[in-house]
Amino acid sequence: VRKPDAQKFSKLLGKKNFFETTFSIEMLQTLKNFMEAHEYNPQMILVNTPVLSDNLKENVDEISYEIFKDKEEDELRDLIEVAEVLEIDILKEVAIACLGC
């Protein structure tokens, strides 16, 4: 797919690093689980920024906690990249809070 042609479909496809980014199935599944678990409602997602303690459970909502509690640092960094490319700020904030805990 040529970039100029792709840009006709979505402004995200025109971002400079979109075609250089590889999303794993696991990262996309986590994103899907995250959005579905919150019923596609960003207002259900709570995150303290900056984090208030090193206890993850005190810094994110219960649903986010359950999804992210076992994620490794490299997985969280990959999720931050996914969130940046797809412009999902709340996912980025939650993943950064997880890194901070």
Image (cartoon, helix red, strand yellow):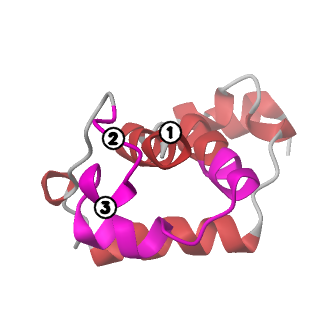
- The 10 Å Cα crowd at callout 3, few under 14, some 14 to 19, many 20 or more, is some
Which callout, 2 or 3, points to the residue nearer the camera?
A: 2
Q: Quadrant of residue 36?
A: bottom left
Q: Is residue 13 left or right of residue 17?
A: left
C-alpha span from label 2 to label 1:
9 Å
Q: Label 1 is placed on what type of residue?
A: Gly
Q: Residue at horizontal 25%, vertical 70%? A: 62
Which residue of the protein is positioned furthest toward the left in this rendering? 43
Would you identify the image quadrant in which residue 26 lies?
bottom right
Is residue 48 shown in magenta? Answer: no
Residue 96 appears left or right of 17:
left
Q: Which mark is residue 100?
A: 1
Q: Which residue is under mark 2?
A: 53
Q: Is residue 62 above or below residue 75?
A: below
> Residue 48 versus residue 5: which sits nearer the camera?
48
- Amino acid tagged 3: Lys
